[in-house]
Amino acid sequence: MAPDVETVTAELTAMAAADHQGARRANSDDPAEQLAWRRLTAQHADRLSEIMDAHGWPTADLFGEDAARAAWLIAQHADRQLDVQRRALRLMEQAVANGTASPRDLAFLRDRTLVNEGRKQIYGTQIAGVKDGSPIPWPCEDPERMDERRKEVGIPPFTEYVAQFSPA
């Protein structure tokens, strides 16, 4: 690995670790915690944008599985930077077409981007909230075929997926 690739790999994995640690802040009742989360995700999205400028979509082939997954997570959480999210989506679509990125991850990013644009999602991966103890997805295109589309990209059926959000 070239030093630049090694540096980017380390950066991406460190950003994902910070993201995991800070994620609880996203839904905090404390405005300072929410602001800290927004700042963190904005910094990460800005850096991902620079990485995409230099390397395109950070694939596992070039950066390793952990760093590729980290890039996807950072793009997922770039909710307030739709330009970065849309660009990541386009680059990831090309990578999936080339066989160098996960169709499953692409489905999650596509749904997240659609929801952030105020449009209906395709795969039912984005949860709007919980009603009577059951997770409710954001509106979905052609909901009768949702599980069929999920299966095509390796996502479990919706009922299995939402069971992980339900209290045990």
Image: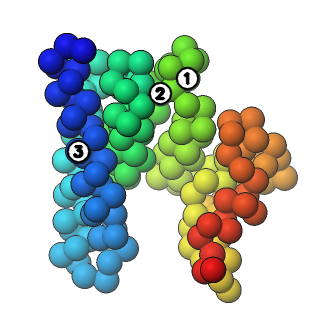
- Residue ranking furthest to the front: 1
The residue type indicated by label 1 comes to Val
Q: Is residue 161 in view from this perspective?
A: yes
Q: Would residue 141 appear left or right of 29 to someone viewing this image?
A: right
Asked if 87 appears above or below 80 in the picture, the reply is above
Indicate the quadrant containing the C terminus: top left, top right, bottom left or bottom right. Answer: bottom right
Asked if 114 appears above or below 57 in the picture, the reply is below
Q: Residue at x 54, y 14 (%)?
A: 98
The residue type indicated by label 2 comes to Met
- Residue ranking furthest to the right: 144
User: Which is nearer the eye, 54 or 20?
Assistant: 20
Q: Quadrant of residue 143?
A: bottom right
- Residue 75 percent location from the top left of the image: 38, 42
Mark seen at residue 96? 1
- Residue 117 percent location from the top left of the image: 49, 49
Between circles 2 and 3, the one closer to the viewer is 3
- Residue 93 percent location from the top left of the image: 53, 25
Q: Residue at x 23, y 20 (%)?
A: 5
Indicate the quadrant containing the N terminus: top left, top right, bottom left or bottom right. Answer: top left
Q: Residue at x 21, y 28 (%)?
A: 8
Mark seen at residue 14? 3
- Residue 158 percent location from the top left of the image: 73, 58
The residue type indicated by label 3 comes to Ala
Q: Would residue 158 appear left or right of 66 to someone viewing this image?
A: right
What distance separates the C-alpha of mark 1 from that of mark 2? 6 Å
Circle 1/circle 2 CB separation < 8 Å: yes
Mark seen at residue 92? 2
Circle 2/circle 3 CB separation < 8 Å: no
Q: Report crowding for label 3: few under 14, some 14 to 19, many 20 or more residues within 10 A (C-alpha).
A: some
Q: Residue at x 56, y 73 (%)?
A: 129
